[in-house]
Image (tube, rainbow, N blue to C red):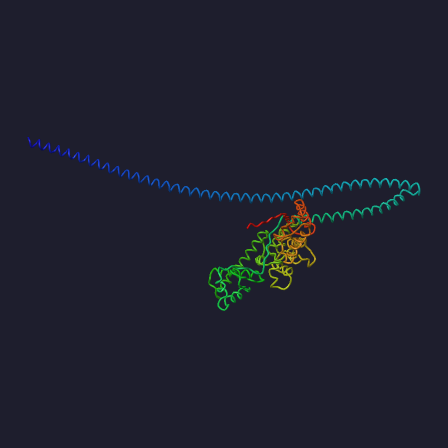
Amino acid sequence: MNDLVWYLALCGSTAFVTFVCLRVWDYFVVKGAKARAREIISRAEQEAENRRRETEVELKELALRYKEEAEQEFRKIREELHNRQRLLDKRQDALDQQSEQLRKQERVIENLQRKLAEKIQEYNRLNEDREKIIALERQRLHEISGLTKEEATKRLLELLEKELQQEVAAAVLRHEKNLVERCEEKTREILLSALQRYAAPHTAEFTTIVVDIPNEEMKGRIIGREGRNIRAFEKATGVDLIIDDTPGVVMVSCFDPVRREVARLSLMKLIDDGRIHPGRIEEVVEETEKEIEDHILRMGEEACREVGITNIHDQIVRYLGRLNFRTSYSQNVLRHSIEVAFIAGMIAEELGYNGALARRCGLLHDIGKAVDHEVEGGHPKIGGELLRRFGEPPEVVHAAECHHDSFCIQWPYTAIVAAADACSASRPGARRETLEKYLKRMQELEQIASEFPGVEQAYAIQAGREMRVILKASETTDEMAAKICRDIARAYEKRLSFPGEIKVTVVRETRFTEIAR
């Protein structure tokens, strides 16, 4: 019995101790778990904070990127709106000019109608006077001469016939004069309308081209040992290569623009490649010549598409492309031909002729200049033979042969092309002025401004498009300055002929200078 009690007591003690140990263990486990939980929470909060910061940075970068894209889009839209506004302004100016021309034509028609009504009234009055005179003459003839009615009628008709012949001759002369004036006025209107509807930019081309080089060492490599590279290059391209002390550039000189362009492209390829020796030079020049031939064909096709010409021989297209490398008095012949084509088409449409045929004549009128350095004779004759050989219509052939009035004009398109050619070649800005004319014009501008009293100095700037005049402050006033400015502008309008406009700026000021020591 005692053993049982002792055993039960031992079991109870063991159970109690075990319970206490479990409670203690649970306490430490819970405490550790809480510590780990706090650590996990702290780490999660730190990661969340880091993530929040990264997200804020990404959002800021995204916002900046969106803002930049929005600004670019805004600038693009603003530029497009600006371009559209300029286009609308140009169209508005064109509409204003057309409306002004219509008003002028309406005034001319009104004047003609008024003159016609006056002529009708005058004719009616003359008719009444004639009837009165006839009645009086008949009565007097019967009273004085005692002639028969038939005799009197015959005599009266002879007298009236003489008077009518004089009046008819005067009327014919008057109408011929009016017709000549109206034809001249209509001709000017057609030419001005064609020139206003089409205007193309022109650039002056020279016989030399500047090619940039990366460093001075490249000059020695281009020359080569004992000059073998430069000799090989000049022999392969047919140009003169000028290498002097000018830093960073090499000059390519040649009168043939095609060879000059081949040389320029070949030299740029050699400089980029870095391998410069006679074999490589010949290879690059041959490759460039093929590219230029393809470019010439492409330029001819683009010119035909621009003008709207189809069914043209491929060789003629190649000759057109070669005109892009041909100049006449610094005017690009291909651009000149395109401009002549458009102007001729407009003139032909105004006159009621075939505008497409006129454009074809205008585009091909200078085709002989593509080969005039290879074939003897002038470019009109050469061009006519080429066009006849490749089956062009007789109107086109005749326009090419006779646009310089070498023969009698048989087709109206020849006269139209001649007029368009003269307009394109002689209008301001089409051909470059010589240096002597340029200097003379600058001197004339400054001399005219210096003739006015009170002018101290006068300078022509912006290639003669603006004058800067300095007055003597002690001899002039602000009111005099305004009058001098207006008088100089009026003097230019009366005494000079110039394209565009000249801006005159008069400066009158007083300066005081002191030196502090």
Q: Residue at x 50, y 42 (%)?
A: 74
**Which quadrant of the structure image shows residue 19?**
top left
From the viewer's perspective, tell me whether residue 61 is left or right of residue 238: left
Is residue 196 among the parts visible in the rendering?
no
- Of the pair 32 and 176, the residue shown nearer to us: 32
- Of the pair 474 and 426, the residue shown nearer to us: 474
**Which quadrant of the structure image shows residue 150?**
top right
Q: Quadrant of the N terminus?
A: top left
Is residue 264 among the parts visible in the rendering?
yes
**Which quadrant of the structure image shows residue 97?**
top right
Q: Residue at x 71, y 48 (%)?
A: 185
- Of the pair 401 and 493, the residue shown nearer to us: 493
Q: Position of residue 73 (x, y in %)?
A: 49, 43
**Residue 454 vertical placement versus 260 (above, below):** above
Q: Position of residue 265 (x, y in %)?
A: 52, 60
Q: Position of residue 190 (x, y in %)?
A: 67, 48
**Residue 145 vertical placement versus 426 (above, below):** above
Q: How many marks?
A: 0
Q: Position of residue 356 (x, y in %)?
A: 62, 51
Farthest residue, direction bottom: 226
From the viewer's perspective, tell me whether residue 109 is left or right of residue 294: right
- Of the pair 209 and 363, the residue shown nearer to us: 209
